[in-house]
Amino acid sequence: MILPFSMARKKSAQVFLDMTDSELKNVPIDYYSLKLTSKQFEKISRLVYQISGIDLHEGKEELVKARLLKRLRHLRIADFENYLKYVENDQSKAEIRTMVDVLTTNKTHFFREPEHLDFLRDVIIPGLPKGPVRIWSAGCSSGEEPYSIAIVLQEILPQAARYEVKILATDLSDRMMEKARQGIYDEETLKTLPRQLTLKYFRRVDFKTGHDHGRRYRVIPELQSMVSFAKLNLMNEWPMRGLFDAIFCRNVMIYFDKPTQEKLVSRFWSYLREGGYLMVGHSESLTFLSHNYRYLQPAVYRKVNPQAVVRAKPVLHRGK
Ligand SMILES: C[S@@+](CC[C@H](N)C(=O)[O-])C[C@H]1O[C@@H](n2cnc3c(N)ncnc32)[C@H](O)[C@@H]1O
């Protein structure tokens, strides 16, 4: 079935959804001439904010349009008006989740902001009380962050996988969770890792994907077993039990507005043990947020209960 573009625009989203894949392929729609009106942009921003806390403020229109065009093309929906109707009428809420997912920014790499990993190796781990080590990578994207943490732990605690070292890695994005769980990366992605670590922690897997015979590498099972992946929207309930020694939430809060950031760091507080650490991205200082953490160094904060410090003073004074 071939529809001229003008006709395609008039058809409701449902019509396209009722078509078979091969029928859909023949629907000519000129996606690049589609307009995203400011009203439509506002509606999308509102929906995304309600679900994910992501603040798609003014200036993000082109990004939203470019990313959602792919979605419209995939669904063969003729314009944004129909797409929004489709999102709103979808009782399963699957499309709104997909919409949020495609609008997330997932840029990451191995050993990103390595000062945090040095701090983990040199300060956090040596200072830990005996017992299991628990670390949370919140907003882990495609897994490079938690696997980098696992490599550091494995390097300093060579039998980390056998000890009780647990890294929880969570993200809102289904696409990213899938990638992270697979733990398969191409050569380009592994370039930020020192060569000897690639050789030690990755094994080559040959994939023949279409015409491309690119080299890919899979994280070794020993490293993978240290990380548990779970889909988690930071705006929703957190089902985890127990406290963490450190939470890495880096380059995630930058997408949230100030009230959302404040709420989030205060929720992290109750998931950290006393003396636990919060790492944020280097462009995400807590300086302008109200919080109780002690600042240690750029983008590193510590949970030190201020009441404990206040109580300690008179006792010292009396003892003199
Ligand atoms: C730029 S990546 C950061 C990845 C990694 N932490 C790093 O620093 O390299 C941001 C990640 O935050 C996730 N994210 C955004 N909003 C979220 C939310 N409400 N709940 C959970 N994850 C979220 C995105 O899906 C994305 O993968």
Image: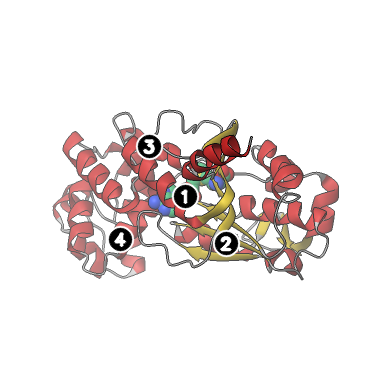
Image coordinates of residue 142 in percent, x first then y, are: 57, 54
Numbered badge on residue 269: 1
Residue at x 17%, y 63% (from the top left corner): 89
The amino acid beneath tag 3 is Leu
Question: Is 315 left, or right, of 205 in this rendering?
Answer: left
Which sits earlier in the primary sequence, circle 2 or circle 4?
Answer: 4
Pick the residue in front: 63 or 148: 148
Q: In the displayed structure, would residue 48 be above or below residue 204?
A: above
Asked whether the viewer can see residue 51, the reply is yes
Per the image, label 2 sits on a secondary structure element best described as strand
Asked whether the viewer can see residue 300, the reply is no
Image coordinates of residue 4 in percent, x first then y, are: 22, 51
Label 3 to label 4: alpha-carbon separation: 18 Å
Q: Which residue is mark 4?
A: 95
Per the image, label 3 sits on a secondary structure element best described as helix
The mark closer to the camera, 2 or 3, is 2
Q: Which residue is mark 3?
A: 63
The colouring scheme, among rainbow, by chain, secondary structure or one colour, is secondary structure
Residue at x 70%, y 68% (from the top left corner): 164
Which sits earlier in the primary sequence, circle 3 or circle 4?
Answer: 3
Which sits earlier in the primary sequence, circle 1 or circle 4?
Answer: 4
Which sits earlier in the primary sequence, circle 2 or circle 3?
Answer: 3
Label 2 to label 3: alpha-carbon separation: 30 Å
Q: Which residue is mark 2?
A: 168
Per the image, label 4 sits on a secondary structure element best described as helix
Image coordinates of residue 181 in percent, x first then y, are: 59, 65
Residue at x 68%, y 63% (from the top left corner): 208
